[in-house]
Amino acid sequence: MNWINFPYIAIPSIVLLVISSLVVILPINKKLKTIIANTSSVLAILLFVYFIISLWINLDRPPLRTLGETRLWYAFFLPIIGIITFNRWKFFWFLGYSNFMAIVFIIINLTHPETYSKTLMPALQSYWFVPHVVVYILSYAVFGVSWIVAIVGLVNFKNKDNKKLLQIADNIVFIGFAFLTLGLLFGALWAKEAWGHYWTWDPKETWALLTFLVYLIYIHLRSFHKGKIKIHFWVLSISFVFLLAAWFGVNYMPSAKNSVHTYSQQE
Amino acid sequence: MTKRKLFQHPWKYKEGVLISILLIIIGLVLGLLTKKPINSPAFPTNLSLIVTYTLLLFAIYKFEHKRQIVQWLSGIPAAISSTVLFAFLAALLGFIPQVSTGMVMNDSLLYNLGLTHLTTSWIFAFGYIFFVTTLGFATVKNFMPIKKKRIGVLLSHVGLYVIILAGIAGDGDIKRTYFILQNNGEPTDIVKDFNSETRYNTPFKLELNKFDIKEYNPKIVLVDAKTGNIIKQNNSRNFSAKNNAEADFKEWKIKVVDFLYSSAPADSFYASFNETDTLGSLPSAFVEIYDKNNKLINKDWITCGNFVWFRKNIYATKNYYFAMLSPEPKEYSSDVTAYLPEGKKETFTLKVNSPKTIMGWKLYQTGYDDTKGRWSNYSVIEAGRDPWLPVVFTGIFLLIGGAFYLFWLGGKSIEEEEEVEEEVEEEVDHN
């Protein structure tokens, strides 16, 4: 298999991932939905396994050097984590989101064949790049959903179901926090390989740590003060602001001028 | 129930906030008085400090856990207060540009307060100690006794505790130095510290056999001649030079008729370029500029210039010109030989993201003479030593374990904690 054959893998995968994501709206029972979602996701993943392995053999090196190859791994890992999380937590929205992001990467690859050979800049050519990005993509999305839950909680505060709502938020936040922690730690392990030290207080690192700390505060608040629901909704919604600052605010801050993460400012 | 007075037990958040403010004030005052950064202790002081501190936490919790202050320090209100303080310090770090500690600074107020070198300031040290103490007590609490159901919570706390203690200890012992290896140079064991420029000798010698660099095709951009601002292609993508490539910038179209990756001017007027691979050869392109009516308005050779040749741009109008940027590196590597004691030697290739460890020194491809690009005469190799790294990595893997637990149990991972905290509260109430 080579990049020439990519559409033959990509298009069936997209179809399978769409089925896996949309099966939730079909008027069939939940058990059947789960079986269909699992089967189609696993088939899509297997197609990617086949393509990646044969490309690897063909290139005679791990396909990790170009932009197009990187997206291949995103499209491979996202549905895997999506289906694992779905089976554990039965969140159809999470499965849908992971599959959707995978489809986006597949489509970008299909429409930009020039990126198959576009070599990544040296700092990004690492085994850690893909896992680091994948867990962050997932954690940001999960926290985005928890933010929506928090806003709903604040707007309908009089609603009696608030406690239940917050319990939903907890599950989501804990999953997001697990991904966020992994992202931070994978970043540290990568930094040791690439820049000589695992932690240099680079502005992006600092803001990622800050995001980690504010969600840590939320988790500890939740474990102690069960009653103070309004405060929890507030903390949860404000935490997301820190996440956004870490995500794209950093590049605009005075401290960012020496950041190693501002790849867009090479010129 | 009578209202609890400030600092009357059991302490809650007000005390946490006051202690944090107090720590900040003392930290700032100490900064103003001492006016210089503090250094992390090196081996063996750091090791004994860490061990003593950890044993002390265990002993205090074991024998004095009924004491109100210990209850408070190992409980959630202190954990949250200290995390808020730590987050506040991280936010300062995130907003205020930091200077490297080796730099000589003028006598500005920000510097004297320690805010421009926060990680080596007194307020950071105090915030850090507060955080480590509450984290330490929480960790110890999870050990006494170890509950199977809370193993993930234990992993997370131990992991974080180990990471940040070993991290700070490592800071005192870490060496980050660099070799400058000349092309065709002799093997050398001289390295310089990144911060202080102090010279050291490594226990082995290193020799550069060959420095190799591959570059991307250079980008072409439009420049506003008045401001010097770079304007990207209309769909905001980067435009790289190659044969027959064309792109729209503002109202003009630029077309690359002939692109030479390695070339030199054929005459002193830069009127034409020849393909060559002699010292200082550089990329050039023959381009045509069209206006919005597709009328050819200018055509000429352009080049990015380097240490041998001047840059040459092409004007679209008086106020706008097209320029070729210097090519960016795609891949660079150094083929080096390390000469070890007893006449052994080892030859290997260093690349960005693929370091190599020799006698406890981790060697990295770091840089080269970027004014000369692929004609660089030397390669910069970082040589780093961090004896605490295995400890930090142990902490990282423990915390990764904790993260998996959190993922698997979700909201359930705190239900147990609630029970425990309630027990503690009851206990406190009895006292």
Image: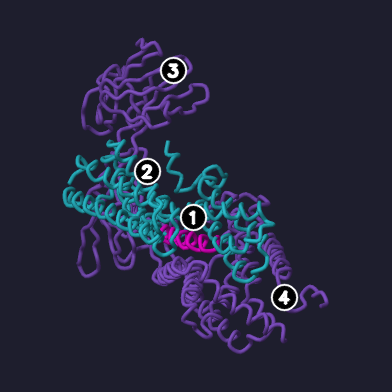
Chain colours: A cyan, B purple
Q: Observer-nearest residue: A243 or A185?
A: A243
Which residue lies under the disc numbered 4? B11
Q: Does any portion of residue A151 appear in the rendered image?
A: yes
Callout 2 secondary element: helix
How busy is the neighbourhood of tag 2: few (under 14 within 10 Å), some, or many (20 plus)?
some
Q: CA distance from mark 3 to mark 2?
A: 32 Å
How busy is the neighbourhood of tag 1: few (under 14 within 10 Å), some, or many (20 plus)?
many
Q: Amino acid at mark 3?
A: Glu
Q: Is residue B403 magenta?
A: no
Residue A111 x, y percent position in the rendering: 31, 36
Residue drawn at x 35%, y 20% is: B254
Q: Amino acid at mark 1?
A: Val
Residue B127 x, y percent position in the rendering: 62, 66
Q: Does any portion of residue B186 appear in the rendered image?
A: no
Which residue lies under the disc numbered 3? B251
Q: Where does the magenta region start and end?
A: A169-188
Query: Do circles 2 and 1 both sit on a common chain?
Result: yes
How busy is the neighbourhood of tag 4: few (under 14 within 10 Å), some, or many (20 plus)?
many
